[in-house]
Image (tube, helix red, strand yellow):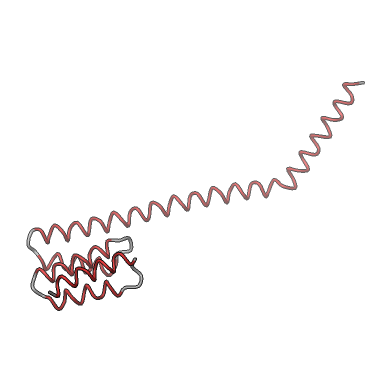
């Protein structure tokens, strides 16, 4: 008799699990698929950003190498390209380096204008704007 009751209990549990599977199974599977898709998207985005940063870094390094070699025109071309395209910090570095190069070439008006543009850029953090104002004051002297 006890075996009959345990078999009936087991059968009831099995039927309830089937019902739960039919009712919530698609939701669970959908959640798993959504989670995996989100993780894949996150990995893809991280790879994309890393690739972009590496490309900007290489472009900045090429411009700095040209500047160190004395080829100011090639360096300025590289910096200006970065100023227009960079998204991950190298644009600001290129702007500062271009302004510094203008000052080193004796092109004070262009240097002052470049530093003023950085100081007035509301998208930058205050510390970078303040730095540009400080360097501008030194160039203006």
- Viewer-closest of 2 and 22: 2
The quadrant of the rendering that contains the C terminus is bottom left
Q: Residue at x 57, y 51 (%)?
A: 34
In the rendered image, which quarter is residue 92 located in? bottom left
Where does residue 19 sit, x and y in percent of width and height?
A: 78, 43
Query: In the drawing, does residue 127 fall left or right of residue 42?
Result: left
Q: In the rendered image of this protein, does residue 15 appear above or below residue 79?
A: above
Where does residue 132 sit, x and y in percent of width and height?
A: 24, 69
In the rendered image, which quarter is residue 137 located in? bottom left
Q: In the rendered image of this protein, does residue 139 appear above or below residue 70?
A: below
Query: In the drawing, does residue 129 fall left or right of residue 28?
Result: left
Q: Residue at x 80, y 39 (%)?
A: 16
Q: In the rendered image of this protein, does residue 43 appear above or below residue 56?
A: above
Q: Residue at x 22, y 69 (%)?
A: 134
Where does residue 80 sit, x and y in percent of width and height?
A: 21, 69
Q: In the rendered image of this protein, does residue 21 appear above or below residue 87?
A: above
Query: In the drawing, does residue 87 fall left or right of residue 110?
Result: right
Q: How many marks?
A: 0
- Viewer-closest of 23 and 117: 117
- Viewer-closest of 16 and 125: 125
- Viewer-closest of 11 and 121: 121
The quadrant of the rendering that contains the N terminus is top right
**Extreme residue toward the right, this view:** 1
Q: Residue at x 8, y 64 (%)?
A: 71
């Amino acid at each position: 008799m006890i075996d009959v009751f345990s078999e009936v209990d087991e059968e009831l549990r099995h039927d309830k699990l089937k019902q739960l599977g039919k009712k919530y199974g698609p939701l669970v599977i959908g959640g798993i698929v959504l989670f995996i898709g989100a993780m894949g998207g996150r990995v893809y985005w991280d790879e994309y950003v890393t690739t972009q940063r590496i490309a900007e870094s290489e472009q900045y390094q090429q411009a700095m190498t040209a500047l160190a070699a004395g080829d100011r025109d090639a360096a300025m071309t590289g910096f200006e390209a970065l100023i227009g395209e960079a998204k991950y910090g190298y644009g600001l570095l290129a702007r500062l380096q271009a302004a510094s190069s203008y000052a080193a070439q004796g092109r004070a008006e262009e240097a002052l204008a470049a530093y003023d543009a950085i100081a007035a850029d509301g998208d930058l953090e205050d510390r970078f704007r303040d730095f540009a104002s400080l360097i501008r004051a030194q160039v203006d002297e």
